[in-house]
Image (cartoon, helix red, strand yellow):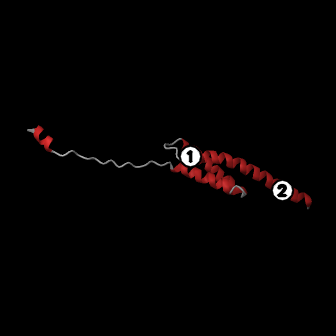
Amino acid sequence: MENQTSENQAPRIVYVQRTERKNKIGTAGFVFAMLSLFLGAIPVLGWIFWFLGIIFSSVGLGRRPKGLAPAGLIISIIALFVIIIMSVVFWYSIGEVLDTL
């Protein structure tokens, strides 16, 4: 009798809603890295954004999915060189101006 009732029932449809996992720390690192790249000309602000970008991107690399964390780390490394070059040029220019006074 049990077999007849199970055969007469309609098949069950189960919907599984997937939630996408996001790496918000890696995304924040990417944003800070971009800010450090574009605002690196401002002496203190560029260093702060660079530091936050490299920290958040490094932490984001350890999480799944990686998302924008690798890009943030690469941009942070590039921004470091840009900030160093801009700082050297800035301080050299200040020295030249002070020498002419």
- Please count the marks in the image: 2
Q: Callout 2: few (<14), some (14-19), or many (20+) C-alpha neighbours within 10 Å?
A: few
Answer left or right for 49 relative to 68.
Answer: right
Which corner quadrant holds the C terminus? bottom right
Residue at 47 percent across and 49 percent down: it is 22
Please, what secondary structure does the residue beneath circle 2 have?
A: helix
Front-most of 56 and 69? 69
Residue type at tag 1: Ala
Front-most of 88 and 38? 38
First-in-chain label (2 vs 1)? 1
Residue type at tag 2: Ser
Front-most of 47 and 40? 40
Answer left or right for 7 relative to 66.
Answer: left
Residue 91's label in the rendered image is none
Q: Residue furthest right?
A: 100
Which corner quadrant holds the N terminus? top left
| Percent coordinates x, y for residue 13 in the rendering | 25, 47
| Percent coordinates x, y for residue 32 in the rendering | 61, 53
| Percent coordinates x, y for residue 60 in the rendering | 54, 45
The residue to which callout 2 is attached is 93
Answer left or right for 4 relative to 72.
Answer: left
Q: Is residue 42 above or below residue 26?
A: below
The residue to which callout 1 is attached is 69
Residue at 68 percent across and 47 percent down: it is 78
How far is disc 2 from disc 1 in space, using C-alphas? 35 Å
Answer left or right for 73 relative to 83.
Answer: left
Residue at 68 percent across and 49 percent down: it is 79
Please, what secondary structure does the residue beneath circle 1 have?
A: helix
Residue at 35 percent across and 49 percent down: it is 17
